[in-house]
Image (cartoon, rainbow, N blue to C red):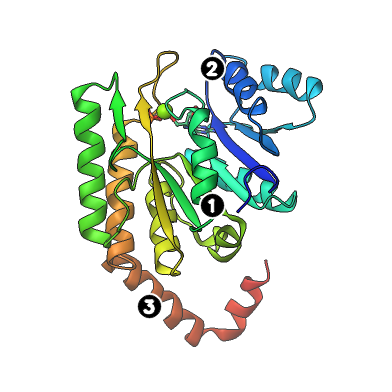
Amino acid sequence: MDGQRSSIAVVIPTYNEAENIEPLVGQLLALPLNLRVIVVDDNSPDGTGQILDRLAAEDGRVIPIHRPAKLGLGTAHIAGFRRALADGAECILSMDADFSHNPRYIPAMMDKMRECDLVIGSRYVRGGGTRFCTLPRKVLSWGANAFAKVMLGLRARDCTAGFRCYRREVLERVALDEIFSEGYSFLIEMLYRTQRLGYRVGEVPIIFENRRRGASKVSKREIYRALYTVLRLRFRGLPWERWAARYRAHRTHEFPAENAGAKGK
Ligand SMILES: Nc1nc2c(ncn2[C@@H]2O[C@H](COP(=O)(O)OP(=O)(O)O)[C@@H](O)[C@H]2O)c(=O)[nH]1
Ligand SMILES: [Mg+2]
């Protein structure tokens, strides 16, 4: 894929990134690529949304999406992906707003897209690594990766990385409305679905630098939800979900007219 000519949309979810978003957008727009930047902001209390509106007024390649409240990393990605697809982008990149994912790696990721359908900016391939990460953060990342790999058979080295480039067709084929992860586990679920569809997944080494400005939004709740997502994907519906589905099917069978009416609502 010719990175210089193909149309690229960079999707960035933001929540309280007022200190980062302007310099990041500036660096992205300065790359010698045909790209636009879609930023999905969840009504950040620190005014990230207002900065975005100003940037959009200054440069038409900046597209803000404003959502009313903090609705999660996964749904923010999906909102950005839909906009990128509607705008006709051929490659859709996703990245954090906090400079952990440095824009300087994007050209190498685009080169790798010549032979892949999904490229991951990876900490865990030769040449990759992390800087300024605390021990708990490293342990969390290693643990989450190992667990997702063992349970789901994921072949990529860095399965939880948010720095990715998807070929348009991948996002068209992965049924975005069927994704059930709202938060961080979205990244694992997307990779799992992409691999299962048989797409080629590649990795490019990056040095992941822990954020210097602003705070991480990963919470304990997100960690539990990620565990749940992996289990749910692994067992394709946990027992109680299967019981609920069976119950629903039974009811539909018992009261077909009533349920047919309810369906259209
Ligand atoms: N729109 C939106 N963005 C979010 C949400 N949670 C996190 N983000 C953004 O997603 C990216 C990743 O979050 P971050 O806190 O850096 O996670 P970490 O790098 O794993 O610590 C950052 O750009 C955040 O601002 C959310 O609920 N909604
Ligand atoms: Mg981050």
Disc 2 marks a residue whose amino acid type is: Asn
The alpha-carbon separation of the residues under discs 3 and 2 comes to 48 Å
Residue 217 % position (x, y):
40, 27
Label 2 beta carbon within 8 A of ligand 1: yes
Choose mark 3 or mark 1, whichever is in front. 1
Label 1 beta carbon within 8 A of ligand 1: no
Disc 1 marks a residue whose amino acid type is: Tyr
Q: Which residue is mark 3?
A: 246
Task: Tell me the element at label 2.
Answer: loop
Choose mark 3 or mark 2, whichever is in front. 2
- Of mark 1 and mark 2, the one earlier in the sequence is 2
Q: How many marks?
A: 3
Left or right: 137, with 167 as reference point: left
Q: Residue at x 48, y 49 (%)?
A: 112
- Of mark 3 and mark 2, the one earlier in the sequence is 2
Q: Which residue is mark 1?
A: 166
Q: Which residue is mark 2?
A: 20
Residue 254 % position (x, y):
48, 86
Q: Residue at x 29, y 28 (%)?
A: 130
Disc 3 marks a residue whose amino acid type is: Arg
Above-or-below relation of 222 to 188: above
The 10 Å Cα crowd at callout 2, few under 14, some 14 to 19, many 20 or more, is some
- Of mark 3 and mark 1, the one earlier in the sequence is 1
Task: Tell me the element at label 1.
Answer: strand
Q: Residue at x 49, y 87 (%)?
A: 253
